[in-house]
Amino acid sequence: MSNKIKFILIGCLVMGFGTRLHAQNPLFIPPTLTGTTFNLNVQTGTQNFFPSNPTPTYGINGPFLSPTIIVNKGDVVTLNVNNGLPVATTMHWHGLHVAPENDGGPHQSIAAGTTWSPSFEILNQAGTFWYHPHGDGKTDLHVSKGLAGLFIVHDADELAAGLPITYGVDDIPIIVQTKAFDVLNQIAIADHMDTALFVNGTLDAYLTVPAQVVRFRLLNGSSMRSFDFGLSNNQVFYQVATDAGLRAAPLALTRLRLSPGERAEILVDFSALQGQQLDLMSFSSEMDYGIFGGPGLGAGMDTIHGYSENPLNGTDFTLVSMIVGAPTSAPITSIPSALVPFVPFDPIDADVNRTIVFDTLRLLPTNMPSLVEGPFGFNGETFDMGVINMEIPLNSTEVWTLVNKTLIAHPFHLHDVAFNVIEKNGTIPAPEEQGWKDVVLVMPNDSVKFITKFITFSDEMMPYMYHCHLLHHEDDGMMGSFLVIDPNAGLVETINTNSPSVFPNPSTNRVYIRFDESSDISTNDIRLVDLFGRKCEVEIRQEINGLSIDVSRLSKGIYNYVIVSSDQENSFQGKIVVD
């Protein structure tokens, strides 16, 4: 089925088959924040998406959605994330190359009423990145309620390439999300009936574009759904950037599939179309089976799980209607022939090969694995805040093989560094997937290889994440953690190699630290800090041959202890995990 659908959810779904309904709402262009210090106030709000009950939402510096942050490569930025929500959240800078303590994963929880202020240098080349919460088990909820925004990086190479760069005029953000709503118009999580389509938070959107070359920064910010972007007149457009940076040269396409978390930049030449109207669409009828949003999930699962009841699945529909107006006073009217040099990693330089298997961890009542619904894991395990799944040497060049043994396609995201996809089922990937990536879609029963290098940052305590970017899969545990460790970093000379025993660890109540009888330790000689170096106010008791720490009031996460003997001759350090 390839009928074109335009829709708004108002209690029930209103659809038009065969003809396009007129768009009603001007596309919202998120405001921008520039400079080097950014104050991001995370807050609650409401929106009247539908005529009846208002919908509770989250937003940054407003009731819904997030502003676009614009920086330059080499800037040293500080991001003050003030959590005004009644619950803890996090903020992850998706695609940015930063130290693990600044990454904003689940280990950097921001308690309600507190502020997290990471500072770091922008090391990425020009590209379209984004930021969103990444809490343990709460990512889908917080993103779906509105916490998602673009993070744009400019650099000298981009400026030299002659690309459109006037934000909101010829450089347009396009954040595509679908959401599900319950009967009270509240946002529903992990619901396959995601029939409400939002672009930049706008339902049923239209946009006036100038009759010239226009750059669209595409982000699939959906929880589950993939999109197959194209133009209603099947006009050629040009991909100029993948997830993590510009291509070597524009790539001519008529379709571009993006799974959740993926970004791309495209150029569309409207020069000869002034006065005409066309649509930016998703040609979802053309996607492969197994991709959420495509024609089907296969193996009879469509009916069992209600997939076929969603009218968006496997159909073609409009994302944004576009009216071509007059050109600007200084239009760009040609597609550049070259962009920035691309030098990929060479597999011959790989130090390590790793394999990650996507598998299911639950049985249905029929004792058949739930290969579509999950929950899913990696290598037979689900995410555990207290477990480090990999330790990776700093400067290690690695080839990772991803093997999908489920019936649904999973977009795999790697934090910290970008990668190059080098194989899909033993063959060279499609041209649109070549370049700098941080998300790759792995089809059912397929294997994908990518190569990357873990540079710049190392930390023996603070991990990065890798995970499926289908958000309820991530929340259900389809995520792992890794440390990047500098093998040449020596320990502090005063650290005693005869470390004490720490148990139980992880713990929810009290942790006991035991020493040998010769250690002279008192409660005055121990310090417990969180991963930001802040001292934790906890009860510490003197025990026989050791100490005990009450961790019952601490938030989940990893904490560091440092113990110094009374004679200053011995010291100990280690980690405690609170779950």
Image (tube, rainbow, N blue to C red):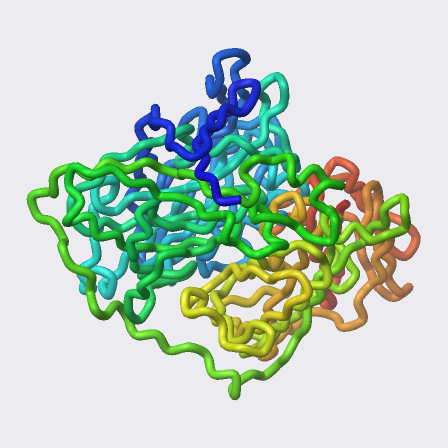
Q: Position of residue 498 (x, y in %)?
A: 81, 71
For this view, does 514 lie left or right of residue 126?
Answer: right
Q: Residue furthest left?
A: 329
Q: Residue furthest bottom?
A: 348
Residue 204 in view in this figure: yes
Image quarter (top left, top right, bottom left or bottom right) of the C terminus: top right
Q: Position of residue 533 (x, y in %)?
A: 58, 50
Residue situated in front as seen by the camera: 76 or 397: 397
The image quadrant that residue 27 belongs to is: top left
Q: Residue at x 79, y 50 (%)?
A: 370
Residue 384 in view in this figure: no
Residue situated in front as seen by the camera: 439 or 366: 366
Q: Residue at x 72, y 68 (%)?
A: 569
Q: Position of residue 357 (x, y in %)?
A: 71, 66
The image quadrant that residue 344 belongs to is: bottom left
Q: How many marks?
A: 0
Q: Position of residue 154 (x, y in %)?
A: 28, 56
Q: Relative to residue 405, is residue 546 depicted above or below?
A: above
For this view, does 418 lie left or right of residue 190?
Answer: left
Q: Residue at x 41, y 65 (%)?
A: 432
Q: Relative to residue 552, is residue 101 depicted above or below?
A: below
Residue situated in front as seen by the camera: 354 or 272: 272
Q: Residue at x 41, y 26 (%)?
A: 62
For this view, does 342 lie left or right of residue 300?
Answer: left
Residue situated in front as seen by the camera: 287 or 476: 287
